[in-house]
Amino acid sequence: EAQVTQNPRYLITVTGKKLTVTCSQNMNHEYMSWYRQDPGLGLRQIYYSMNVEVTDKGDVPEGYKVSRKEKRNFPLILESPSPNQTSLYFCASSFRRGLGSYNEQFFGPGTRLTVL
Amino acid sequence: QKEVEQNSGPLSVPEGAIASLNCTYSDRGSQSFFWYRQYSGKSPELIMFIYSNGDKEDGRFTAQLNKASQYVSLLIRDSQPSDSATYLCAVNLNIGNQFYFGTGTSLTVIP
């Protein structure tokens, strides 16, 4: 089954304790992204990647790191989490289409993170 | 100014009516436009995309794009209670992977 998986699905942690949220896709997609979703602010892109070893900052990258060492995996790293990073996080993947086409994203199930 | 703006609603329509959802965007370089549906507690799922001016129909859904006015809309005909969800408008700035989403419009279809 084609899918994007995220782990963990739920996480409660404390300020300053490093954590990693994993994201994996089995569709051989080149493109992957991380988003956070907050009430009233919608989905905001944190980082995106267009291929292995190619990552770019999205709209809200502060406090986050990513890496893309393999095509299928795109982990999100919070080196020193703070309470303002409490949010619902989504990973998404898509494949590169040609000029004049579109980029359909497939989303993972989400990770609800609480930082105390 | 936000890149993508939507009326947050809530929007309520009776079953069988047409629901009209609207979205405006600020970057004239935007290439493609998407409507996602998100049920409470679930991840967004794509229901329509459009990248040319005009209308695009898919079943009960019609997306409309007007690049001159920087406006995208979604019409849902014969609305069903199962259409009750939050609808997210998204803009892809180029053929790459940078996206901006609106805050979503909550739709309730009343049986």
Image (tube, coloured by chain):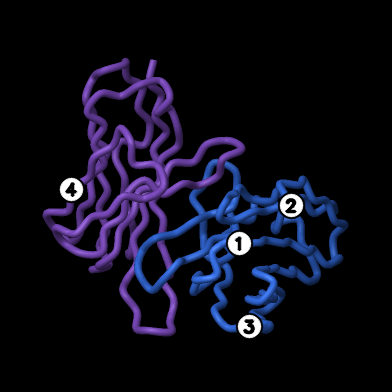
For residue A93, what is the image quadrant? bottom left
Q: Nearer the viewer, mark 2 or mark 3?
A: 3
The residue depicted at 50 percent of the width and 47 percent of the height is A43
- Kindly identify which residue carries mark 1: B25
Q: Residues within 10 Å of mark 2 (few under 14, many from 20)?
A: many
**Chain A's colour?**
purple
Q: Earlier in the sequence, mark 2 or mark 3?
A: 3
For residue B99, what is the image quadrant? bottom left
Q: Label 2 vs label 4: CA separation?
A: 37 Å
**Up/down of A37 relative to B79, above or below:** above
Along the viewing direction, whichever of B44 and B4 lies nearer the viewer: B4
The residue depicted at 27 percent of the width and 54 percent of the height is A56
Q: Residues within 10 Å of mark 3 (few under 14, many from 20)?
A: some
User: Which chain hosts label 2?
Assistant: B
- Kindly identify which residue carries mark 2: B107
- Kindly identify which residue carries mark 3: B53
The residue depicted at 45 percent of the width and 67 percent of the height is B93
- Kindly identify which residue carries mark 4: A67
In the displayed structure, does residue A13 sit left or right of residue A53? right
What type is the residue that disc 2 sits on?
Leu
